[in-house]
Amino acid sequence: MSFLPIIINPAAGNNEPILNTLNDVFSDDVKWEVKITHASGDARRFAEEAVARQAAAVGVYGGDGTITEVAQVLANRDIPMLLLPGGTGNGVARMLEIPVDLRQAAALWSGNSVVRKVDLGCINNHPFLLRADIGFLAKVDVETPRLMKDRFGKWAYAFSTFQHLSDLKPVAYQLKLDDEELEMEAVLVTVVNMAALVWGHRPIAAGVSPDDGLLDVFLLTRDDIVAITEVVSTPVLGTPAPMYHWQVKSAEIHTTPLQPLAIDGEGIETASAAISVMSQSVNIIVPAFTVGEAE
């Protein structure tokens, strides 16, 4: 009998009968049990327990922050994640074309699915699946109220972006991108693993892949409202973002003065940034057709 622990973040954005739905979907040959998070770090601890108990997979119901905690534990292990989207934007699930409907996502455990190996980024020892932000977008991430996220979902970040336009001011950036060293004035840098930016599920640029062993560094120098409008509308309209773009395996980014940092929509300590990538280190259960299209 397969052992499948399900880690649930009760503070996630959706209000739905989680246990009833899972009980309907999972067959009798699945031994599933629930662990409830109450604080940051709980998901990581529960994932470590699942590894010790040799779980067949680890289910995660919650937002991208909860998913990333579990991904860090499962990196470079054979145990896959079963994503059960329950967050505000569900960026990881959307980027991997996992259904955001709970019943459909849970059905991937026994349905037409495969395991996809994806990259895991890291900034100052903090892992991220979606992106790491430095500067303006990090400030937006940190200062978008939970109430707004719960009420407006992924649109909350777009609203908050325009509310903070007065903070769109250039500062000095020193970048080491692999072996290339640059100095530029910019208003923000975002380091993308899964191409999610503001809207959470559309690419910001062609050629960005979650499993190519590379991170995509985007830098915005313009500080006008037209530029930020073009940036946030890029995923919707498919137009080129007005940003510099590099693909790297590692980066060091310093700012003067120091700028806020955030990963997957959550703030971390303010510091200079050391960034790296763990290539194809996390196994995630996805619909079978998505891998065929990706290849």
Image: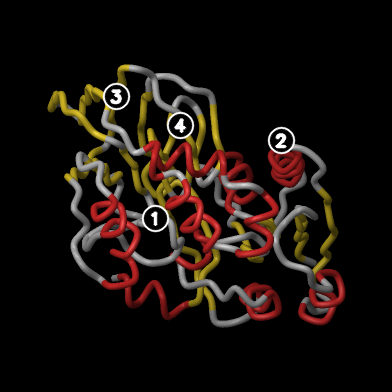
- Kind of residue at badge 1: Leu
Contact between labelled residues 4 and 3, with CB atoms less than 8 Å apart: no
* Residue drawn at x 46%, y 31% as measured from the top left: 261
Tell me the residue at 47%/49% (across/down): 163
The quarter of the picture where the C terminus appears is bottom left
Q: Is residue 257 left or right of residue 51?
A: left
Residue that mark 1 sits on: 197
Neighbours of disc 2 within 10 Å: few (<14), some (14-19), many (20+): few
> On the image, numbered disc 2 is attached to which residue?
41
Circle 4 residue = 261
Foreground label between 1 and 2: 1
Answer whether labels 3 and 1 touch (C-beta < 8 Å).
no
> In this rendering, does residue 275 appear at all?
yes
Q: Secondary structure at mark 4?
A: strand
Kindly identify the amino acid type of the residue bearing the numbered disc 2: Gly
* Residue closer to the observer: 272 or 178: 272
